[in-house]
Image: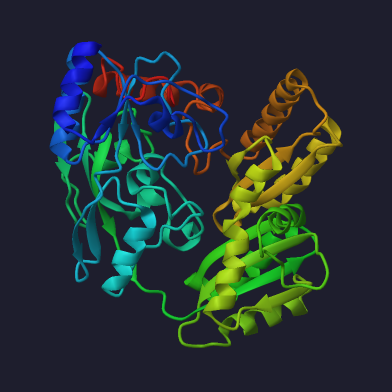
């Protein structure tokens, strides 16, 4: 290992590696601080060539590599194990925007680019990159692609997978797969790039991507709506789609309990209503030049008794305040303590039934637990979280967590859903992949892993 570490230091050069425990510490735990690992060295290559050289050196030594982007994931997919024998590769220095082509509506970027910077680069040429999530100020595009991130705009633009035109990937032997094409149509053989999107660094290390850009949505309208029941959100979405068609950019369902946490823990956060309602929907639409488009649609929905109250943002500042409430949820939950996190997806047609059955299920299993629900209901994705009583012992928490999570995932599977919608599988959900994607699916995944990474050196122990 000593010889390999010296070789890696030489590849990336001074200032691009560290073995200092203090500097390593932030990289050795996932965002919520629930999983901890060890590493002998962190390296930060600045080019695809350096990534390739690092992988070749590690492959020759039979040492595993864990690629890490912004480390904002919630499934421990970017953290090394506790053996202290896995090399940690930070993608932070691979942060160049190689090209922005406004006429082709595309941009070529490196994996370490921060998502918010890509959004800004698109705006600078009057284009729009729609991937948007709460961690966009620190998450990196390579990690977004490796986990097939979703975010708030999936209802109109799709997940990260739908935004990729081409990829550059370093394979397990150091070979560089250069597929940085910017074509919308290309039927020449297998679509190899899609193997790596969502693979969490287990099949190859994404070093760059060609991404789709879009025309800007133009003027938008944002509103926060109050509902009496969670199921009303499903009916409301269908109602608004009839009048707004594909102009809906985002449609976010949030429970009163969630917003109560935000108001408690986030300075300056305050709902714009005089009273508390059970459920809320945050909606953003493109107006198409009609400033009254959303208001008129909401009036129709209110006449059908789908909305209890509504606040429409009068300007960008008010819209930003409403979105700050939504984007502060993860931080507020972290302040509130540990809980059971369930990143699930349900067919929208089954959503209303699931919400009712899920609440009854939790009431039966543990009535003293709190259900905290929010998510991108427009694409069927819910963050279905449960806070356990604070007085429980660690052993009791683990037992209750296993029981509740298993029951929720069983219900999700029964209703045609998925236990992982946008956070990936990583380490923490690996056993559930075995359970719910068994048979031919998991067998083919293992065969792909064996074919592309026969030494099992790319992020081993994650996903499968």
> Relative to 356, is 61 on the left or the right?
left
User: In this orientation, does residue 355 appear?
Assistant: yes
Which of the 4 image quarters holds residue 167? top left
> Relative to 35, is 282 on the left or the right?
right
Residue 387 image point, x, y percent:
74, 38
Relative to the observer, which residue lies in front, 21 or 126?
21
Residue drawn at x 43%, y 28% as measured from the top left: 79
Relative to the observer, which residue lies in front, 263 or 424?
263
Residue 401 image point, x, y percent:
71, 27
- From this view, report whether residue 340 is shown above or below residue 94: above
- From this view, report whether residue 116 is shown above or below residue 395: below
Residue drawn at x 26%, y 31% as measured from the top left: 17
Name the quarter where the N terminus is drawn.
top left
> Relative to 442, is 350 on the left or the right?
right
Relative to the observer, which residue lies in front, 37 or 77?
37
Residue 65 image point, x, y percent:
30, 24
User: In this orientation, does residue 191 appear?
Assistant: no
Which of the 4 image quarters holds residue 397? top right
């Amino acid at each position: 290992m000593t010889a390999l570490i010296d070789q890696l230091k030489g590849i990336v050069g001074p200032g691009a590696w560290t073995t200092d425990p203090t500097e390593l510490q932030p990289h050795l735990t996932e965002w919520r601080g629930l999983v901890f690992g060890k590493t002998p060295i962190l390296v930060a290559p600045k080019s695809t060539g350096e990534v390739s050289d690092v992988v070749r050196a590690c492959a020759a030594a039979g040492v595993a590599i864990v690629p890490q982007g912004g480390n904002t994931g919630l499934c421990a997919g970017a953290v090394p194990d506790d053996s202290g024998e896995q090399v940690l590769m930070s993608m932070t220095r691979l942060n160049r925007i190689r090209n922005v082509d406004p006429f082709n509506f595309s941009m070529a970027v490196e994996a370490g680019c921060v998502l918010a910077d890509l959004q800004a680069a698109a705006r600078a040429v009057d284009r729009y990159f729609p991937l948007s999530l709460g961690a966009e100020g620190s998450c990196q595009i390579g990690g977004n692609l490796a986990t097939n991130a979703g975010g708030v705009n999936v209802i109109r633009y799709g997940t990260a997978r739908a935004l990729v035109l081409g990829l550059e990937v370093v394979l397990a032997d150091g070979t560089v797969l250069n597929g940085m094409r910017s074509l919308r149509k290309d039927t020449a053989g297998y679509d190899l790039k899609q193997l790596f999107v969502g693979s969490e660094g287990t099949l190859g290390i994404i070093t760059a991507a060609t991404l789709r850009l879009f025309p800007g949505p133009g003027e938008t309208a944002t509103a926060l709506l109050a509902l009496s029941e969670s199921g009303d959100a499903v009916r409301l979405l269908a109602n608004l789609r009839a009048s707004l068609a594909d102009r809906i950019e985002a449609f976010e369902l949030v429970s009163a309990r969630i917003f109560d946490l935000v108001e408690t823990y986030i300075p300056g956060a305050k709902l714009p209503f005089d009273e508390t309602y059970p459920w809320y929907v945050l909606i953003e639409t493109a107006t198409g030049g009609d400033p009254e488009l959303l208001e008129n649609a909401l009036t129709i929905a209110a006449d059908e008794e789908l909305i209890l109250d509504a606040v429409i943002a009068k300007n960008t500042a008010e819209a930003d305040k409403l979105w700050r409430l939504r984007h502060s949820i993860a931080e507020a939950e972290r302040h509130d303590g540990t809980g059971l996190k369930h990143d699930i997806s349900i067919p929208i047609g089954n959503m209303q039934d699931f919400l009712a059955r899920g609440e009854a299920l939790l009431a039966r299993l543990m009535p003293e637990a709190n259900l905290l629900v929010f998510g991108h209901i427009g694409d069927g994705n819910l963050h279905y979280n449960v806070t356990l009583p604070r007085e429980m012992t660690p052993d009791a928490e683990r037992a209750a967590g296993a029981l509740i999570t298993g029951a929720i995932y069983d219900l999700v599977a029964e209703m045609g859903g998925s236990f992982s919608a946008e956070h990936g599988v990583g380490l923490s959900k690996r056993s559930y992949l075995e359970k719910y994607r068994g048979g031919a699916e998991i067998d083919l995944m293992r065969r792909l892993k064996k074919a592309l990474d026969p030494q099992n050196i790319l992020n081993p122990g994650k996903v499968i």
